[in-house]
Image (cartoon, grey):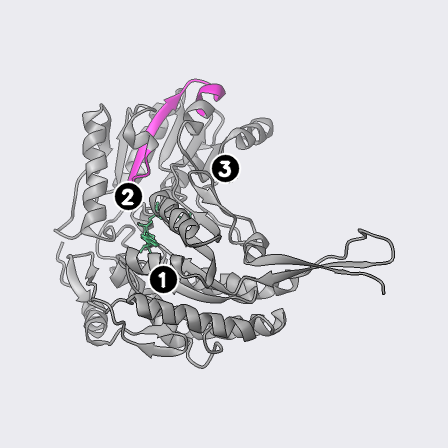
Amino acid sequence: MTTEPDAEARRRIEEIGARPWRQRIGDELRTGRGPTLPITDPTNDTVLAAPATADAEDVREAVERAAAGAAAWGRTTPRERAAAVRAFADVLERHAEELAWLDTIDAGLPLWMMRIDAATGVERMRMFADLAHSLVGHTIPASAGNLHLTFPEPFGVVARIIPFNHPFMFASSKLAAPLVAGNAVVLKPSELTPLSALRMGELADGILPPGVFSVVHGGPETGEALVRHPAVSRIAFTGSHQVGRAIQRSGADAGIKHVSLELGGKNAMLVFPDADLDRAVPAAVKGMNFAFAGQSCGSTSRVLVHESLAEEFTERFVRAVDALRIGRPWDEGVQIGPMVSRRQQERALGFIERAVAAGAEVLSGGGRGPGDGCFVQPTVLGGVAPDSEVAREEVFGPVVSLLRFRDEEEALRIANDVEYGLTGSVWTRDLDRALRVSRALEAGYVWVNDTSTHFPGVPFGGWKLSGIGREESVDELLSYTQLRAINVVAA
Ligand code: NAD
């Protein structure tokens, strides 16, 4: 494989290098005052751009302007806010191709997939605009003759910290609910993939009122400064449990903060003897989210197959994974691109090496490449022991572990014997078993005879180490409000 990009990719890569990458601080677009951080092209690990980061002063200013903006924004009606969010969604939709390309180049994710992500981000923004009418309070008959009312009120400033794996889709969709609920948002994208979010900051110009949307660029220090600012009372984080814990700790040090956490997963797909393998095998491939090089929190990275089907399933699954086309993310027909960075690549390869040392067998892939970019071949591991590292820890790479079980009890024991609890997938044509097993799984989001699909409006979120809170639904919208009760006593 050559790492020489085609003409369009080359043009866009040059543009990225030549542009000033500015942050949105309140409604001002300007270069950060902190040190620069290189953003790399994962197909060859070369530097694309080195935007300046936000220093503590930039963060402070973004939060203070957000607090000022939130005061007026929170007094508008949900309908007015929904209209502004819709207008922003329209602008982003008009720039969807540009935003998809930024993510493809910056994160190494296939262009066709980033086009879907761009459309999903815009669709979810519109979903939250449509849900604006759900911001209602109650009247409560708590005492005779008086009036008892509740109001869902915004918090003020929301810090929104996101990871690298869906750069634009998360930046856009996770902005909508706090805005519709009446808050101002300071968004911090991943330092690895900030470009589409920085571009969103520019595109918001003249669309959203002053102060309500800022984008700051930087790594842990920038995130930490945001979390610790006294005017930030609501923090919404998507990322690893290690950072989630750090945020809970620094949030608690700095004050009493409402924190929601969307964290990692080590998700199990359970294939029972009556499963339809014609559907289950492609679903296991889809469930692993190879289009994201496995860098997806909901990936079904443990496939537990009943011993009666294990051989046939393994043979068909390995054939399907062997056939995946790996390459540059902008090339036609590519199904899996590089991982986001050299560090993530080495991390995934380390998991494979240790799994083999612990007795697992590489049935497909297992190595780096093609070329010297941050590629890891889609990898299937067989003979994985349920208590081994690769069966219990999140790889966040294109590595699937195959395990066998004898009966339902053993399947559930293995599936639940991890610290995570994000998703699960149950394959059976027996409705009793489907419901029994779904409800016995320690996971926040379960599919029966499906994997990977997210349905707008259905709450997504984790149990155990996978997080706190629910998103993608009315629950997310309401989580950006705090209740005020007013008691009117008859005079
Ligand atoms: P990460 O936790 O390393 O980083 C996430 C974000 O936190 C980045 O923006 C980073 O700069 C910021 N950050 C780092 N240290 C910080 C600190 N001390 N204070 C404040 N912010 C800080 O995660 P990642 O490597 O970008 O993403 C991978 C992880 O995200 C995986 O564990 C994956 O499962 C998880 N994830 C979860 C979901 C979900 O919906 N549950 C979705 C996508 C990804």
Taking the image as drawn, is residue 118 in sight? no
Image x and y of residue 65, in percent: 43, 73
- Which residue occupies 45% across, 81% down? 206
Question: Which of pointers 3 and 1 indicates the residue nearer the eye?
Answer: 1
| Horizontal relation, residue 58 to residue 279: left or right | left
Label 2: which residue?
Answer: 397
Q: Is mark 1 within 8 Å of ligand 1?
A: yes
Q: Earlier in the sequence, mark 2 or mark 3?
A: 2
Q: How many marks?
A: 3
Q: Amino acid at mark 1?
A: Lys
Within 10 Å of disc 1 (Cα), the crowding (few <14, some 14-19, many 20+) is many
Label 3: which residue?
Answer: 449
Image x and y of residue 103, in percent: 31, 62
- Which residue occupies 20% across, 56% down? 42
**Image quadrant where one finds the N terminus:** bottom left
Q: Amino acid at mark 2?
A: Gly
Look at the image and give the residue range highlighted in magenta: 393-411
| Horizontal relation, residue 242 to residue 274: left or right | left
Label 1: which residue?
Answer: 188
What SS does tag 3 mark?
Answer: loop
Magenta-drawn stretch contains 55? no
Examine the image and state in which quarter residue 316 appears. top left
Q: Are marks 2 and 1 in contact (CB under 8 Å)?
A: no
What SS does tag 2 mark?
Answer: loop
Compute the Cα span from label 2 to label 1: 23 Å
Residue 115 vertical placement versus 473 (above, below): below
Q: Nearer the viewer, residue 244 or 414?
A: 244
Q: Earlier in the sequence, mark 2 or mark 1?
A: 1
Q: Earlier in the sequence, mark 3 or mark 1?
A: 1
**Image quadrant where one finds the C terminus:** bottom right
Q: Amino acid at mark 3?
A: Asn
